[in-house]
Structure formats: structure tokens, C-alpha cells
Image (cartoon, rainbow, N blue to C red):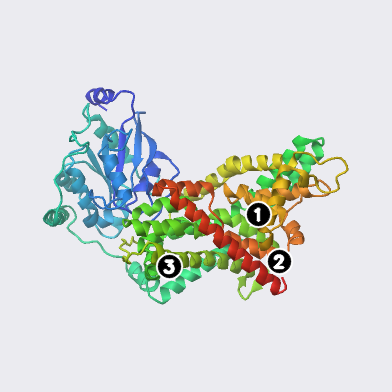
Amino acid sequence: MSAANAATLGELGDRAPSVALVGNPNCGKTALFNLLTGARQKVANYAGVTVERKVGTARLASGRTVSVIDLPGVYSLRPVTLDEQVTLEVIEGRRAGEDVPDLIVAVVDATNLRMNLRLVLELRELGRPMVVALNMADVARARGLAIDSKILAAELGCPVVETVAVKNDGHTGLLQQFGEAIGRLPAAPAAVTEHGHAARPAVGLNEVIVLQREVTRILALAAPQPMRKPRLDARLDALVMHPWIGPLILAALLFIIFQAVFSWANWPMDLIKDSMAALGEWTSAHMPDGPLRSLLVDGVIAGVGGVIVFLPQILILFFFILILEDSGYLPRAAFLLDKLMGKVGLSGRAFIPLLSSFACAIPGVMATRTIANWRDRLATIMVAPLMTCSARLPVYALLIGAFVPDRAVGPFNLRGLTLFALYLAGVLSACAVAWVFKRVWHKSRYQPLMLELPPYRVPSLRSLAMGLWERAHIFMRRVGTIIFSLTVLLWFLSSYPAAPEGATGAPIQYSFAGQLGKLLEHVFAPIGFNWQISIALVPGMAAREVVVGALGTVYSLSAADDQVAESLAPVIAQDWSLATAYALLAWFIFAPQCISTLAAVRRETNSWRYPFWMATYLFALAYAAAFVTYHVTLWLGG
């Protein structure tokens, strides 16, 4: 870097220069952000995944750090949805407490320049320092598209650099361009109007036509040869988008996923289970009897260990989801389900938020910002919790493992079939609630889904590894914070006050938790829940996974011989009736949301009214479903 450029950089002071990544949805922007910063962010091959900007740090060859901002994908600078509004506000410096980005990096999909260049031309009108990242350049070349970067740079009036976000060194040229572009930055940011945003004329229909003509002119100079569409893409689409074959393929894929969750996870789950049991026995053998040993064995090992054992199943589930995302299949699944969602009163754009809710309802609720119509957005928010989030999986796995025989049903596993049925019940329930919600409360017309279909791609091993690592990190962080804290608190409430002299029952029955469980048992007895289950449901309001750990703690402290059970499953299989187990499964299809999700709904709707109604209707549905399931199972002899 020259001395003059270094001096200009010095005018920025100690503040790290900021770079904003802007681009159309599905242009590989978030993958490029991960490559630049090393951050662990979700990368998905469909539009609308990024609903808030993310910040990371990149290091230049000179050693200087640059703050990189990953913004939600937009098609133009005329916002229609909330996520597009976030992008525009950041670019124009209208976000409270945030400076105007020093440099804009327009990320474009080299295989779809005709659509991507419209946004680049709008960004150029801002008059801000800009670099164009020609992403997926390798794919474009492989399909016979020759792009002259020098001509493109001359026509756009800014540097153009090729990037390949799925390769480890695919950002080298962009980092070099960062250093050169930031070195040319003026001492002050670009001029803004008195309203706080960069001046630009309003865009009408005529301006849109002119803009598209300019895109066509630039493409004729920089990329005159058309790109060859792979024949394989067309052949695959003929199958997966077929009105009859497509849904069958989707159902088969989901079926295989749930079979794998149980079939593949047996060995690692047994390993974790045996390790936790050995750790509990070793701790009991090497520590004197007392409160500390009880905390470690009955609280931490029985509670936290009972949750960790389900990590393999969660990772297997997300492994398949990430493959479907990266391959480009999920947008096609959205189109397949669009008509069905329209019949129940949901917008086609609700597919992606609802899909996100299978991981966790919080990002699903946040992803509804891609829905422009408020009523459609609110309907999606209200049904998002009915999607079976990953926090329910440990509860399902525990109950299925304890009460459903591990036997084959034809070529399938009965436990996998049961899990598939539970997920399907959640989806059907969401459809039913949406149908009632839109026709009784918020009536609105169906709006067809308009979504760009990305090309099929071979999933990146690096992207898969990062996605699985992020999921494992999130899960273990919850285990080490929320679940650990609640487990320790529950152990304390379950251990004190101590049993009185001459007491004949288990000490936990005389504790604070035991007394609370006895009170709650009057509420939950009609649906078959005993006092141990009633206790476990309370910390489950913070995180559903805690229910398994809470049951482990409660039953460990309830054991007559003061020894932690090697596994919770055989204990509840002996203690509970089949009707109770099925009722608890039915409860968790509708289980009232965790506090974090209710807080997210409050933030997105700016009202406590909707979280209140959400918790109320979910509790009512959960209680009714458990009541019917319990008594029908009893009537059938269970």
C-alpha cells in the first residue's frame, strides 16, 4: 500500500473501516461473508434466509482489520419488506447508533447477471465507494459464460473482482481490493441529504425500463455469449417440480430423514449414554456422600447428561436439512407446497419462515420479515411455533425409545415412523390453525409465491461442516448455560428442605419442587401427568430440552437406593402407563412456547397481545390433545 493511501487510512482513526455486503437473495453473499470473516453463520441456498445484518471482522494483508456487515438480500433499493428496509437503512446510515459503511461490496451471481446488475446500477447512483464481487465465477465459466471483468468494471465505473465463496482462497482478490479501495476513501463519508439518506431520484416505470435497457447494453459488451443451461437441471426439475411426482419425492425424502435420525444415531447415543453412566458411577465411588456429590451426580450428570445424549440425532437431522438447502432443492419444495399453503390461508412466502421454525421458532418468527403483507406475516408468526423445533426432538426421542418397540415395519423402522408421524401432526396442526386464523380473525387474499429458483449445486463440504459445527455449538452452549443453570436450580429445589425425621417417602417429595409438583398434579392429573412430569414442565418453559434433564434429576432424586439410573428410558417405561406417554407426546406437539420465543414475538409485533394469545391457544390445544389422547388410549386398553 502506498504512503498516500496509508495516510488516508490514518484519517479514519482507530475505527476499523466498515464494508457492507449487498446483493440479491441467493447470490452467495452470506457464504462470502463466512469466508471473509471466519464467522459461523447460516448459509442457505434460497432467498430470504438473512433477515438481519450480521457483523464480522476480516484481516487485510497489511494487518489492518475491516468490519464486514452481511445485509439481508434485496432486489432493489425500493424496499417492500422489512428485511429490505434494514438493508437500505444500513446503507444510508439511518440505523440508530451506526455509521454509514465506508465501502459497499455489491455481490452478484455471475450466472445470473441480467437480474443482479439492476441492483448494482441502483447502488452506483448513490455515489458511494463500491466494489463489485463477481461471485460463482467458476460456475459461470464451466457453463460457457465468458465475462470480461475489465469491460464490466469500465462500464460500472468501479473495480470488479472474481470470487468463489465455496473455496478457501476464493476471496483473496477481494481482500486485496478492500485494501486498495479503503486506501482511496475520503476523510468523510459520502454526502447525504438533510433527511439522512443519499440523494437519488424516485424510480418509476419508465426508469425501470431504462434501467433494464442499460443492463442489456452492458451485458452485450461484457458477456455477449449466452450461458448454457445444464441439461441435468432441466431433467431434475421435470421430476421434482411435477405436480404429482414432486410431492411424492418430497415425502420420500422426509421419510428417509426421520428413519436416519433413529437408525444412524444408535451407536453414538449409546456411547454418550454409557460414558455419562460411567462418569456418574465414578463420581459416586470417589466422593463422600453429601450435597456436593448429590449436585454432581443427581443434578449435573443426570440432568445435563440426559440432554447431551440426543446431540447425534439433532446433528443427523440438520445434516440432511443443510444438504437440501445447499443443493437448491428447498425453493422447489416451496413451490410444491405453495398451493397447499394458499388453501389454508398462508402466503407462499411463509414456507421459508416455517421451514426455519423446524430448527427453532425464534429465527422462524424473525424470517417473517420477508412477508410484505402484515396480516399474512402475523398469521405465519402465530403458527410458526407449531412446527416441530429441534428442542422437541430430545423429548420425542426419549418417549419413543422408552415406549415404541424397536422393530421393523416392512423396510422401515417403527420408531422412525412414529417420529415422522409426530412431525406430520405438527404440520397438519399448523395448517388447521392457519385456516381458522385467517378466516375468523384476519381475513386476507391468497398471494402466489414468487421466488427465484437457484441452479442445482453439489453441497459444499466446508459449508456442511460449518453448519453442523454451528448447530452443535448452539446446542452445547444451551446445555452449558440455560440447561445447566436450570438443572442446578431444579436440584436445589428438589433437595431442600430435607425430609423430616421418620419420613418414609423419597426426600424429593418433601422439597420445594415436590410440593410444587403435588400442587400442579391436580391440574395435570386429568391428562395422566404425575407430579414428576408436572415439575419437569415448569423449567421446560425456558427451554424444551430441559424437560428431559429435569426428569433425569427428579427421578434420580426419587430413587430409593440413591443411585442415578443408567438411563431414564427404562425408569419411565416402568413407572408410566402407555396412555401417559402418548399424552405427553400429544402435549409436546402443541406445547406452549418457551419464553424466548414469546419475547421474539413481542419484539416482532411490538405488542404483548400476540404473545399472550399465542401462549393461551397453544396451552389450550396442548391440554385438549393430551386429554383426548390419554383417555382414548385408556379406553383402548393402554
Whether residue 139 is visible to the viewer of this picture, yes or no, is yes
Residue topped by disc 3: 435
Q: Position of residue 150 (x, y in %)?
A: 18, 45
Q: Position of residue 441 (x, y in %)?
A: 40, 62
Return the disc, 3 or 2, that comes first in the chain's sequence.
3
Return the disc, 3 or 1, that comes first in the chain's sequence.
1
Residue topped by disc 2: 578
Contact check, label 3 and label 2, Cβ < 8 Å = no
Q: Position of residue 332 (x, y in %)?
A: 38, 65
Per the model, the C-alpha gap separating discs 3 and 1 is 39 Å
Q: Residues within 10 Å of mark 3 (few under 14, many from 20)?
A: some
Residue drawn at (27%, 38%) of the image:
94
Residue topped by disc 1: 269
Q: Quadrant of residue 484?
A: top right
Q: Quadrant of the N terminus?
A: top left
Residue drawn at (33%, 27%) of the image:
15
Label 1 sits on what residue type? Met
